[in-house]
Amino acid sequence: MTDSDLPQGPASRRIDPAGLVVAAVLAVLAVVLVLDARQLPATTMYGMGPEAMPVVIAIGLGLLAIGNLIDALRGNLPPRESADPKPVLLILGGLALLIAIIGLGGGFILATSVLFVATSAAFGRRAILTDLIIALVMSTLIYLAFDRLLTLSLPAGPLERLL
Amino acid sequence: METFAALAHGMAVAIQPMNLLYALIGVFLGTAVGVLPGIGPALTVALLLPVTYKLDPGGSLIMFAGIYYGGMYGGSTTAILINTPGESASMATALEGNKMAKAGRGGPALATAAIGSFVAGTIATIGLAFLAPLLVDFAVKFGPEDYFALMCVAFVTVSATFGDSPIRGLTSLFIGLTLGLIGIDKLTGQARLAFGVPELLDGVEVTTLAVGLFAVGEALYVASRRHHAEEKIEPVRGSLWMTMEDWKRSWKAWLRGTMFGFPIGALPAGGAEIPTFLSYSTERRLSKHPEEFGKGAIEGVAGPEAANNASAAGTLVPLLTLGLPTSATAAMMLAGFQQYGLNPGPLLFAERPDLVWGLIASLFIANVMLLVLNLPLVGLWVRLLAIPQPWLYAGILVFATMGTIAAKPSVVELSMLAGFGVLGFLMRRYDFPIAPVVVGLILGPIAESQLRRALAISLGDPIVLLQSPMSATLLGIALIALLAPFVLKGLDRFKASED
């Protein structure tokens, strides 16, 4: 018997908004699948065309949306601990910067260093300069190891051209 | 004996100096990455895939074998020394092993885990070597409808039957199946769910999904709850070696764990959780020291750890013979095969016996290397565990994005990685299992093409699925496995209300 099997008190029998969102997202996904499948031209082949499977999966998603909705209304969801959104946003910001730097041709070393510093700050480090130096050294070593030794092409920017 | 000849041939491939080196690198990297907290074997394989991009298929698969087993060993070290099992299969190990470490018996706990994994891994790999050819002979006769039915069984067992909640598991599976639809349909060349984005035409990369869900998702999740509790590493105090008493209490547990792990892993039932927990409860029942359970009983580490490793070798049976991944790690191994255009299955045994048997032989070698490497190097692994959390997760994210940047340095691909990271974070937070998404993505398109092939042969008549006795039986099993958890839950509730 696990904890979730234990009889739950009346407090936990509340409607769970997160579960409602999950159900709604699944329903929307099902609609998107059906709409996308409908724009595929029907083929004359025997058997199933490419439009059949999306519809099958959409039906499954629809049923699961109902199932999740019932769970949410019954408040049947496992308990959650509180979460701090700030570090999550900091890491996502780091990822966004990484994508921007790669997209604009800033190169591997700069991009991953920014991500490193952002993540490390999200986990509570405040020594940003030290972390930046560590990040630059580490990503330069990774770049050299992968680009030169394993001949994997990593995107080069101004810093990589100096090497 | 055919198997002996094939295995000897495989051994000859594996023992070439270059391949031995690949195995050694794989074992070393696998352990080093697997030992990092929060990184399970599936993620270890996903993160290290880019390292193998430029190798030839043989060498790369051998390195994979090492990474796979190394990741498992590393995971058990983490479970014992910090109480954070990287995956649910290490939960039982963490339960007793961490208590042993707290009581200053971390050394024997690590030793019984390492030796137990070796014993189980070796026996299970022998099982794999003998079972695989039999299954291949059988699988040659499979038609596309049988494969489709088999995959239905895998879908259901991976997502619904053995999880906490069938609805949540199936939701995860269907998210994976939906992602699997994206891209050009292989049979007609039409684009599905690409929304005019050229990068989506190739479909979703398994590695991008796995690394996003596991690595980025885990980093976000740990960061979001950093304010809860800091993890504590138990130092390895006292002797590393097991006493006579420890050996006496361990060896039967190893063998019993193997007996649970291998057959359950070899069934397309997915996951090592069941055998590890079966082993744990069996050891607890049979132990002469039941009072020690929960306080650090060595049998509670030896048995589950052996079961875990044996089931890992077991999952290679359906993977190699049928191309059927039944765990996230096996799905990553399949992705490793696919990057060379290789499809595991009966054909691969016939066409590339050197590859398949070289891989199986390397599993033996990797096992020996791990035993030799792991105990003496335990100090090094402990030091890896002590990397401060900010740098650890920052480094993990750098490595995670590096794999994607090396494979496809496009803004779309990296955005997908970040998006899957958010998905992984939300799934962890709201308690949806992750492995079914990966299995759905990789197996969904294969199942669809088998179904469509079957229907094309039957001129569109769906009765073909029930005409083949094999396929009808398997679909029946899938249906039962799908309904069983709902029925059992109903019974549970009934019983509870009676009490």
Image: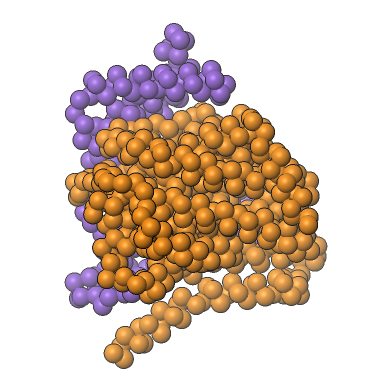
Residue B10 drawn above or below residue B317:
above
**Above/below status of B29 relative to B83:** above
- In the picture, the quarter occupied by the N terminus of chain A is bottom left
- Rendered image quadrant of residue B375: top left
Q: From the top left corner, tell me how far across and down residue B54 is, in percent.
A: 61, 29
Is residue B167 or residue B164 the one in the foreground?
A: B164
Assign the C terminus of chain A to one quadrant of the image.
Answer: top left
Using the image as rendered, state which of residue B110 and residue B443 is in the foreground: B110
**Chain corresponding to orange in the figure:** B
The residue lying at 43 percent from left, 32 percent from top is B399
Q: Residue at x 34, y 37 (%)?
A: B379
Looking at this view, name the residue that lies furthest to the front. Answer: B244
What residue appears at the point 31 percent right and 72 percent down from the top-left corner?
B290
Is residue B389 found left or right of B281 in the rendered image?
left
Taking the image as drawn, is residue B139 in sight?
Answer: no
Q: Residue at x 52, y 41 (%)?
A: B369
Q: Nearer the viewer, residue B317 or B217?
A: B317
Q: Which chain is purple?
A: A
